[in-house]
Amino acid sequence: MSTDVESGQRAPEFEGGDSFEEFGGPEAVFGTADFEDERPLRPIDWNTLTADEALVEWGDLDKFVKWLRLSYGLPPAVVPPLWHRHDELIWELSALHTARVNAYDPEASPSAPLAWHREFRECQQRLREWVSLSGTRLDRDRPTRQTAWPGEPPYDPAPEVEIVDRDGDFAAFVAEDIAARRAMEAALGFAS
């Protein structure tokens, strides 16, 4: 951390002395929705987002997850490369992101970051369990297995795939998600 003498504020530095500004400011590192939104901070319900809202939230969540993974040295057993292909990981990481933004808000209690770190520790355990159950790894991924209940047709197990380009897969995933949301909006007569 470095101190801005004029304001007395400490600015985070990255390895090698780089600062947020060298990376385009905090918005480039953490995303923009939480900085530019005039609405109060709220949990993200991925089931109800419009296509336009989802596009912003996906970008912000991906930036947060990359920052989290690198800042805390999290292994793929906690945050795997294709976390975005697993609903259970999306929901947990999204909740963690919202909680962190809230904990580090200038209006938050001075002890809020400590509370966030307690929540983060619990979250890591859940992420570890879900990653283990889902079968996703550093170099391979498969959809989380589903169990059919009595009377339901059995689910076909999906094959495992090799992870070649994580960022490319994320971009394709988001494009598919946004297209599906736009199709739903069109079918229901909504405009995003």
Image (cartoon, rainbow, N blue to C red):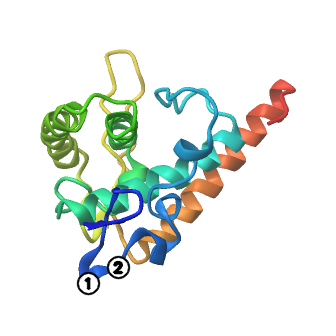
**Residue 77 spot, x, y in % from top left:** 16, 56
Q: Is residue 4 left or right of residue 69?
A: right
Quadrant of the rendering where the N terminus is positioned: bottom left
Q: Is residue 82 visible?
A: no
Q: In front: 110, or 119?
A: 110
Q: Which mark is residue 155?
A: none
**Residue 150 spot, x, y in % from top left:** 32, 16
Q: Residue at x 42, y 27 (%)?
A: 153
Q: Residue at x 34, y 40 (%)?
A: 104
Amino acid type at circle 2 is: Asp
Q: Is residue 160 left or right of residue 57?
A: left
Give above or below for 174 relative to 122: below
Residue 184 is drawn in which quadrant?
A: top right
Give above or below for 41 relative to 67: above
Give above or below for 18 relative to 20: below
Amino acid type at circle 1 is: Gly
Q: Is residue 95 visible?
A: yes
Quadrant of the rendering where the C terminus is positioned: top right
**Residue 13 spot, x, y in % from top left:** 30, 71
Q: In front: 14, or 189?
A: 14
Element type at mark 2: loop
Q: Is residue 121 left or right of residue 11?
A: left
Element type at mark 1: helix
Q: Residue at x 34, y 26 (%)?
A: 148
Q: In front: 147, or 150?
A: 147
Write down the residue under mark 1. 16
Write down the residue under mark 2. 18
Give above or below for 106 relative to 67: above
The answer for how far apart the CA atoms under marks 1 and 2 are is 6 Å
